[in-house]
Image (cartoon, rainbow, N blue to C red):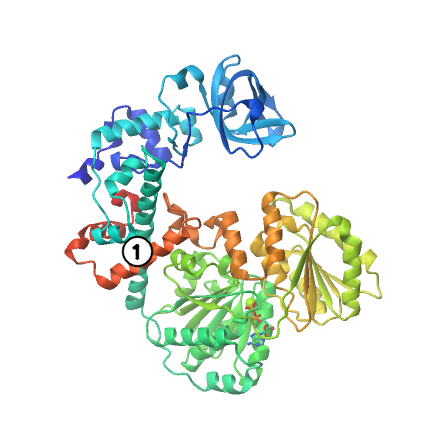
């Protein structure tokens, strides 16, 4: 059987001795023939063309150059130490630079020899350079055949050191395929392959290593990406089905007095259509006896809080308690203030638990939680400490969860016989298909409508030299009775420097906006919680007109009269952070403004971020740009969802294929929910293996 053939240990392959087998296992996780076949190139290069150094252009991407190495030596000091070599041909000179493996290259490269060099060029001043080039002696290069689509395999420092070069892998693949021939079983059913016009498994596995044409390579990649995404989607869909049928939770069947009275008599405003819709979705989800695990996406200011409150009331109507967990102390306090105010007419018992609550008060909270007289507990991670025991927690609401780890969320579940329903609220929306694929175990509700009467925030980008004009603008707005935020970046690694920036900024603001005409608040991470709170409250009450702060105000803070957001060194913030910060204004009826201040030195990426902010206030659009800039690695929870282990597909770039794969998986499971049909045996086989959780590709090969 082919599959057994592919499980042959890698040591058996010609060209792999025990030492190299060890290295392949350790560095790449390659233990057998199948693993090696599934070690895909990460790009393909044209090794038949050469460039002249004198004719390089700044936009050139990957270039191949032949030249003589005329010098090599170390430059810079400390962390900036690097190895720099000069390469010359008859048209000019360029530099080659290494930050990693310096000793190895210093020892192995020889001056006066002629090399073939390949890599991405950049230009510094008038000098072109390539960092970490592929480099090989010309005479060795000439000893081999070169194609216009030479595969380049991923490498590691250890592999480079131990001379497992790209050429080595190319040779190894040739050896492997001469032994295994067409050993791959077809994982996808015929009709699916026909629908999607996919290449066969065997052909794709061959083309990916030895492309015969660009077209064939594209088809091979499409086939393998589709396969990878399809099986991940199958798994997510099955997991979701299992959760819905197997994990029981409390059925909140009644919609009772608390909900009705509040809804009919105490709502401070009419809900938007989107709010009504998601409340319905949540209600239905909590009523059917299965466990709710729902993500509520809604842009900043879209009104998630009221949805949270109504969700709590549903739990209370059914005899349960509820909790709301926030990522920071300030946010927890704001939630507490907001929720208490909303629920004041109801007589429900709401408490706040954070790290700074006194032991005495804490004891009362613990008692009331256990005897059931406390209805809603709001707080920070203090909520998930072991001492905190609810009598009967029915729903846990987690706000802005990108700050919470998955493990922390899981801890909330351990408080009961049944897991409480979970509602996770986020203001960092991502496109729906992507969200469903990333968090397959979550259901999703989206608030895609802002409360009426909001004016779009006007956003501009200004340079430091425009500062006087900006000050003038601030004065005019304050004269109209508005309040202003001025935010400074905080980057952990250089906290003292940032602190100095903030303090310098604060001093110049106080000079420009002197007492007693102006009052200026300041809030930053190094203040005691009490002082922070005092300063925040002064701003909230309108006693100060300007709030100078670090990003502690990033999430949640709600001061409707604040209508101007100035972000200093805006180029240092990420897109979603900028969007969150901007969301602090535009909460009242007045026209609001966001001013992004930067220096003149901006990277291309920073420019894109700033332009995006100026162009749109749509959180979904911003999230999409952000995703393209940063990749999915930074999105909350992706590391746990297995999506980061994708071998060939790219969840952002291949999002269309992802949607197709998801739809195909849904269609498949509709037709054959138990994967029992004869024609689906191969799929069944992959899914069975997947259940053992040993990594996808081990089993689709
Ligand atoms: P977020 O989704 O950012 O948490 P909030 O729940 O804090 O948003 O709501 C933002 C502001 O909008 C609050 O001042 C809230 O009172 C107000 N708001 C929420 N929903 C509505 C609505 N349907 N009509 C009018 N104002 C609303
Ligand atoms: Mg909020």
Residue name at image x 48 percent, y 18 percent: 115
- What residue is at 63 percent from the left and 48 percent from the top? 572
Q: In the picture shown, does residue 425 fall above or below 123?
A: below
Q: Name the quarter where the N terminus is drawn.
A: top left
Which residue is at 27% across, 43% downward?
A: 698
186 shown above or below 579: above
Crowd around label 1: few <14 · some 14–19 · many ≥20 (10 Å) = some
Q: Which residue is mark 1?
A: 235
- Mark 1 falls on what kind of element? helix
Of 245 and 133, nearer the camera is 133
Place residue 417 in its image quadrant: bottom left
Q: Position of residue 237 (x, y in %)?
A: 31, 60
Q: Is residue 569 left or right of residue 336?
A: right
Is 297 placed left or right of 182 in the picture?
Answer: right
Quadrant of the rendered image containing residue 241: bottom left
Above-or-below relation of 173 to 425:
above
Whether residue 356 can be seen here:
no
x then y, percent, for residue 129: 57, 27
Between 464 and 50, the residue placed more toward the observer is 50
Residue 662: horizontal and vertical position, in percent?
A: 34, 57
Check the picture and name the quadrant holding the C terminus.
top left
Lateral position of residue 664 relative to residue 56, left or right: left
Pinpoint residue 569: horizontal percent, then vertical percent: 68, 50
Q: Nearer the viewer, residue 547 or 561?
A: 561
Q: Is residue 34 left or right of residue 88?
A: left
Is 693 or 585 nearer to us in this picture?
A: 585
């Amino acid at each position: 059987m082919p599959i057994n053939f592919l499980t042959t240990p890698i040591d058996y392959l010609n060209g792999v001795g025990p030492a190299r087998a060890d290295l392949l296992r350790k560095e790449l996780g390659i233990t057998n023939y199948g693993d090696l076949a599934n070690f895909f190139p990460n790009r393909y290069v044209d090794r038949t063309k050469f460039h002249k150094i004198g004719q390089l252009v700044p936009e050139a991407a990957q270039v191949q150059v032949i030249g003589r190495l005329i010098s090599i030596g170390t430059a810079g000091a400390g962390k900036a130490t690097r190895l720099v070599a000069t390469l010359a041909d008859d048209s000019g000179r360029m530099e080659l630079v290494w930050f990693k493996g310096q000793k190895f290259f210093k020892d192995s490269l020889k001056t006066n020899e002629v090399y073939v060099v390949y890599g991405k060029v950049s230009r510094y001043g008038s000098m072109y350079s390539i960092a970490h080039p592929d480099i090989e002696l010309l005479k060795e290069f000439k000893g081999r055949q070169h194609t216009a689509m030479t595969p380049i395999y991923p490498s590691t420092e250890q592999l480079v050191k131990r001379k497992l070069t790209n050429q080595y892998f190319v040779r190894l693949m040739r050896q492997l395929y001469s032994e295994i021939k067409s050993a791959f079983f077809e994982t996808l059913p015929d009709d699916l392959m026909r629908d999607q016009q996919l290449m066969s498994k065997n052909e794709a596995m061959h083309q990916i290593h030895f492309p015969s044409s660009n077209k064939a390579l594209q088809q091979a990649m499409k086939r393998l990406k589709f396969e990878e995404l399809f099986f991940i989607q199958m798994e997510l869909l099955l997991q979701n089905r299992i959760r819905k049928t197997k994990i029981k939770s409390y059925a909140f069947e009644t919609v009772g007095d608390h909900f009705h009275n509040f809804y009919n008599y105490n709502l401070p405003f009419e809900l938007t259509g989107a709010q009504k819709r998601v409340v319905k979705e949540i209600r239905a989800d909590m009523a059917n006896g299965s466990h709710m695990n729902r993500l509520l996406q809604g842009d900043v200011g879209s009104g998630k809080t009221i949805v949270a409150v109504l969700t709590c009331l549903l739990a209370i109507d059914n005899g349960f308690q509820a909790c709301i967990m926030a990522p920071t102390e300030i946010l927890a306090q704001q939630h507490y203030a907001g929720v208490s105010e909303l629920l004041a007419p109801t007589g429900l018992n709401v408490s706040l638990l954070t790290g700074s609550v006194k032991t005495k008060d804490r004891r009362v909270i613990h008692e009331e939680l256990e005897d059931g007289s406390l209805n809603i507990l709001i707080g920070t991670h203090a909520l998930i400490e072991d001492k905190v025991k609810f009598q009967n927690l029915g729903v846990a609401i987690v706000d802005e969860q990108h700050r919470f780890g998955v493990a922390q969320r899981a801890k909330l579940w351990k408080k009961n016989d049944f897991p409480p329903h979970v509602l996770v609220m986020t203001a960092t929306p991502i496109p729906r298909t992507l969200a469903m694929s990333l968090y397959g175990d979550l259901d999703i509700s989206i608030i895609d409508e802002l409360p009426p009467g909001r004016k779009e925030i006007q956003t501009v980008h200004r340079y430091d030299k425009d500062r006087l004009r900006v000050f003038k603008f601030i004065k005019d707005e304050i004269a109209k009775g508005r309040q202003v935020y001025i935010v400074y970046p905080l980057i952990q690694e250089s906290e003292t420097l940032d602190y100095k920036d903030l303090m310098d900024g604060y001093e110049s603001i106080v000079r420009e906006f002197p007492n007693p005409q102006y009052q200026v608040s300041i809030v930053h991470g190094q203040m005691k919680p009490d002082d922070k709170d005092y300063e925040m409250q002064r701003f909230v009450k309108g006693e100060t007109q300007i709030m100078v702060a670090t990003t502690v105000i990033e999430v949640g803070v709600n001061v409707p009269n604040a209508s101007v957001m100035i972000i200093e060194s805006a180029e240092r913030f990420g897109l979603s952070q900028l969007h969150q910060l901007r969301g602090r204004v535009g909460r009242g009826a007045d026209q609001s403004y966001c001013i992004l201040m930067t220096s003149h030195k901006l990277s291309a990426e920073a420019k894109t971020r700033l332009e995006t902010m100026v162009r749109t206030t749509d959180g979904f659009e911003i999230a999409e740009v952000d995703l393209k800039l940063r990749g999915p690695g930074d999105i909350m929870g992706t590391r746990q969802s297995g999506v980061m282990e994708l071998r060939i597909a790219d969840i952002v770039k291949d999002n269309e294929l992802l949607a197709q794969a998801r739809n195909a998986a849904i269609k498949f499971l509709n037709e054959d929910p138990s994967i029992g049909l004869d024609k689906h045996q191969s799929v069944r086989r992959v899914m069975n293996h997947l259940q053992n959780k040993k990594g996808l590709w081990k089993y689709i090969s």
